[in-house]
Each structure stands twice: as C-alpha cells, then as structure tokens.
Amino acid sequence: MIKKNNIWLALEIGNSRLHWALFFGAKLDSTWNTDYLPESVIQQLAQCQTLNDLPPEILPPIHKQANQEKYTSPSSPCPLPPAPCPLPLAIASVVPSQTALWQTYPNVRVITLEQIPLKGLYPTLGIDRALALWGAGKTWGFPMLVIDAGTALTFTAADADECLVGGAILPGLGLQFTSLGQKTGQLPLIETQAIASLPPRFALNTTEAIQSGVIYTILAGIKDFIENWWQLFPMGKIAIKGGDRTILLNYLQALYPAIASRLTVEPNLIFWGIEKIVRIP
Ligand SMILES: Nc1ncnc2c1ncn2[C@@H]1O[C@H](COP(=O)(O)OP(=O)(O)O)[C@@H](O)[C@H]1O
Ligand SMILES: CC(C)(COP(=O)(O)O)[C@@H](O)C(=O)NCCC(=O)O
Ligand SMILES: [K+]
C-alpha cells in the first residue's frame, strides 16, 4: 500500500488528540497535531488529489504556507512525486471509537501488535507503547526504556533480545491536574503550560500545593523507575516522548541533572516505528 517514494500519512491517535506525520517514502517530512476530526473531514481527505488539497482541519494553512514551495509548484527544487489519491494512511490508535471512525477511510492500514517484531507482547498492550519502543530501540539499540509523557504517563521497556521487559501506566501531568480540578469542590484547574518554574515542595497557597503534589511525585516516580531500569540494564537507553516531555525534562534537569542528561527526547518515536513496519523493503 505504501510504495518506495510514495507520499503517505501516518496518524497516531492518542487519548488527548491526533498526531500527524507526512512521509515522502521513508523520509519523515513534517509532523503536527490536531484535535479529533469528524467523518466529513475523513471523506474530504479521501478526495484530495494533491497535498495542497489537504483539508485545513488536517493540515493547518500556516503549516501549508510554511511548506508552500514543497507542496505545489512542480518546478520546485524537489518536485514532489505525484500524491496518490486517496493518500495512503497508516494508523496507530489507542482509542477504539476513533479507530472505527478512521477505518472508513478508503486507503488505510491500521497497525496492530502482531505486525511489530518485538517479542513477549501481551494482547492488551497499547499499540502506541509498542511502536514507540520499536522505533526507539531500532534507532538507538536495545535494551531500551521509553517514557511517554502523554495523557497517561507510561514506561515501556525491552531487553537486548527485543523482548518486552514490561512497563507501567499512571495518569499524566495534565490528567492529574484535570482530575483534581474536576473531582473536587474547591481546587482550581491548573494548566500544565502555565507552570514556568518548579514550585516549593511545601507550598503556602493552593495553586502551588497542587503543582507541588503532582510535579514532585511524578518526577520522583520517573527517577525511581529510571534508577530501577539501570539496576536491571546498566547500559539500557532511555527515550522520552509525549506532550508533556519538554516540561518534565526541564523539571528533571533542575532536580536530577545526572538523570536528565542521559535521556533522549524524541517526539516522533511512534512515526519511526510505523515507518519501519510499513516500509517496502
Ligand atoms: N496543545 C495541546 N493539547 C493537548 N495536550 C497538550 C497540548 N500541549 C501539551 N499538552 C500536554 O500533553 C498531554 C497529552 O499528551 P500527548 O502525547 O500530546 O497526547 P496523547 O496522549 O493523546 O498522545 C496533555 O495531558 C497536556 O498536558
Ligand atoms: C496507556 C495508554 C492509554 C496511553 O495512551 P496515551 O496516553 O498516549 O493516550 C495506551 O497505551 C493504552 O491504551 N494502553 C493499553 C493498556 C496497556 O498498555 O497495558
Ligand atoms: K482511556
């Protein structure tokens, strides 16, 4: 379905939003995020003849303008190969209702666990966790631990034989703030993006008390899992992805610089994993 130099799209469906990647063959050209989209946009996508036709809900105009010369003029320095119509779309989803919606697209390949060469996978493992681990491990080597600071914060590891060691799942930074804001009578909803610097651990106001409770325990948990990982695999590598990766890495650098300096930050691990699976040898 995806030929060597073909243009194709990869879509990672998470519990907060959609993550998109545009590939030219094996080359990752660009990535962006959108909210969940209605079926009408999926149908528009199925009709588009060129990248310029991509519905604005999928490829925001500012993104298109930034890449204008690539997507339209045939005389551009690297004229694009013709975009097949409908564009091939590879999907990795952890939201069944979204998977069902996107399966209506006429040229779709849904990535499932069986397609991933990792050994020892259990049947309910999140496809996002397996793909990120495969993408990271095949890029930098195994043993590999992937930390995904997404809606949920996950740890997922494989040993030197590319066999699943296992992992853990907990509410992500945003989810922890949301749950306190929504499930209590008096606590305000804290926005993750609004926290510039580390709060005091022993806070003297409600907002900083919430920030302290969530941030210091998440960081302590990350430190604990990483130290345990290095006891198991002293040469084990660690990669971090997800919407909260930057904010958490900044905090880790402030609190645990020796650990932070050994983490590889890479938001596109899942797209790398998808590309390795769909590539035509
Ligand atoms: N523009 C944004 N929209 C949603 N979440 C965001 C955004 N920017 C950062 N985040 C943070 O990223 C987290 C979601 O992680 P992400 O990896 O993007 O989502 P998903 O779990 O859907 O893959 C949220 O909990 C939030 O704290
Ligand atoms: C844990 C997750 C919800 C994380 O998804 P995300 O935060 O990226 O939306 C997802 O990996 C999932 O649905 N996992 C299934 C259960 C498991 O991995 O064991
Ligand atoms: K869920």
Image (spheres, helix red, strand yellow):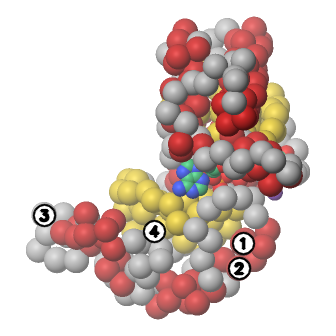
Near mark 3 (Cα within 10 A), the count class, few <14, some 14-19 or many ≥20, is few
As drawn, the label of residue 8 is 4
Place of residue 112 in the rendered image (x, y in percent of width and height, measured from the top left): 74, 59
Residue that mark 3 sits on: 77
Place of residue 33 in the rendered image (x, y in percent of width and height, measured from the top left): 50, 61
What residue appears at the point 58 percent right and 90 percent down from the top-left corner? 40
Question: Between marks 1 and 2, how big is the CA–CA gap?
Answer: 5 Å
Residue that mark 1 sits on: 98
The quadrant holding residue 247 is top right
Q: Could you tell which of marks 3 and 1 lies nearer the N-terminus?
A: 3
The kind of residue tagged 4 is: Trp
In what element is the residue under mark 4? strand
Residue placed most toward the observer, 199 or 254: 199
The kind of residue tagged 3 is: Pro
As drawn, the label of residue 101 is 2
The kind of residue tagged 1 is: Gln
In what element is the residue under mark 3? loop
